[in-house]
Amino acid sequence: MADTLRMDRMPHIWCPGCGIGSEVNSFADAVKRSGIDPKKLVVVSGIGCTGRVAGYVNFDSMHTTHGRAIPVATGIKLANPELTVVVFSGEGDLAGIGGNHLIHAARRNMDLVVICNNNFTYGMTGGQVTPTTPGSAIASTTPYGNYEYPFSLPFLMDAAGATYIARWTSMHSRNVTQSIEEALLRKGFSFIEIISPCPTLYLRRNRLGDGVDQLQNYQDNSILKHGADTRETAIDFQGKIVIGKFVEKNKPTYLESADKCSIKLVGDDYQLYGKTIPEREAEEKAEKERIAARRAAMAEAEKQEEAAAPSKAAAPKAVVKPVAAVKKAPAKPAKKAPAKTAAAPKAAKKAPAKAKSVKKTVAKAKPVKKTAAKAVAKAPAKKAAPKAPAKKAATKTAKKAAPKAAVKAKAAPKKTSKPNKTRK
Ligand SMILES: Cc1ncc(C[n+]2csc(CCOP(=O)(O)OP(=O)(O)O)c2C)c(N)n1
Ligand code: SF4
């Protein structure tokens, strides 16, 4: 990774368990595998946690203004069509403030690769509701549950005219790599959505545990369906997530259509950026050959690495440091909520959260449609729930894992409470 990242800018700002890091890893891997010339790659981001990607990758990159990554990327592509232009940003940036640019770039089949980190929230600004936040999810701006209808981005992109559409979660890192690699090597507007955990704002507020718990949810709830009808890709709160490559088709890109139109007017002498079409085609062919050669070299190197693998396996195992054994901090179960809300006493009685393991909760989770009254009735219960002493507990567990502190840890009173990962 070191050559694809600006290591001088490490450590990065992303929280532990955030999905953005693994997406960047997949992206870097895809760039390497694709064989494209990194010097001809530009990464553009908007603003937000995901927007920081542009600042960490060791390619030419631009951190633009909120919602304006796509117009900037479009400008770069038009200024120099030889470049591969990637937009890497959050769903708030791309589909919220930048929504208009997103649909028009897709409509024009602009030659861009758009990687959208969809964490269902405006992470950087404190967890507000976004155009993809599932119904009933809690956000800082929807404390009683989201009552808006969310976008399904694959459906939106399909309707707008995108020619490549895929969706994965940040748990499907190999598929993410593969999709990005494919998109880098094709022409036209490619849209890759990656559903990703934001433990700090979305998961915490919705009591969904940490990043790993959410990966477990993705594991349990993802349905692989290549070529799925994008009308069936909506996501309910903690519900099923249809993943796969939904669309892959060819149609003239914006530049190809512009060329065609200009040739009609000017004839075969028409030049774009000082080159006739045959000249540009010859250059493109030569570049394709160079890419194929780099890909072949990459595949060969991988083969050799695999062949050398058994000797690696025989090497002595690395000693695991005690810190690696730090377990997840168990959170206290929510206290029984006093049923104060007169408007919906029945719903209020239901409010106390049962302590369940996330694995179980996730497996049983069904998209729940709640009435506003129920949601309001549940709100006081949430307030009554004590905060989980996560830091303290983590330190205790860490001490437990450390051989020296074992005696102390034993003496410590045993924690009987199970983690409460169920959103009330
Ligand atoms: C024009 C403008 N409006 C609002 C903001 C404030 N702002 C900065 S980041 C952000 C949210 C980004 O959310 P998202 O794109 O989903 O990315 P995430 O942080 O979740 O990765 C907002 C609203 C801004 N910087 N500029
Ligand atoms: S706030 Fe959320 S999206 Fe931003 S870095 Fe932290 S976990 Fe990731």
Image (cartoon, helix red, strand yellow):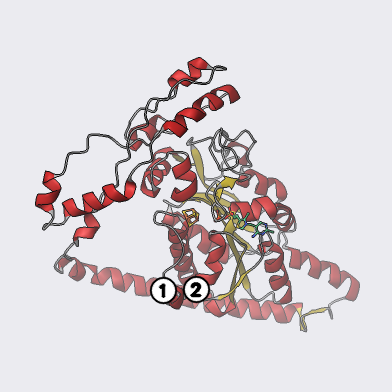
User: Type of residue at label 2?
Assistant: Gly
The quarter of the picture where the N terminus appears is bottom left
Per the image, label 1 sits on a secondary structure element best described as: helix
- The residue sitting at 84% across, 77% down in the picture is 268
Q: Which mark is residue 143?
A: none
- The residue sitting at 60% across, 25% down in the picture is 372
Q: Is mark 2 within 8 Å of ligand 1?
A: no
> Label 2 near label 1: C-beta < 8 Å?
yes
Crowding near the residue tagged with mark 2, few <14, some 14–19, many ≥20 C-alpha atoms within 10 Å: many
Foreground residue, 261 or 117?
117
Q: Which mark is residue 298?
A: 1
Crowding near the residue tagged with mark 1, few <14, some 14–19, many ≥20 C-alpha atoms within 10 Å: some
Which residue has dot 2 on it?
35
**Place of residue 387 in the rendered image (x, y in percent of width and height, measured from the top left):** 38, 40
In the shown orientation, is residue 108 left or right of residue 175?
A: right
- The residue sitting at 26% across, 70% down in the picture is 307
Q: Is residue 135 above or below residue 90?
A: above
Q: Is residue 403 above or below residue 377?
A: below
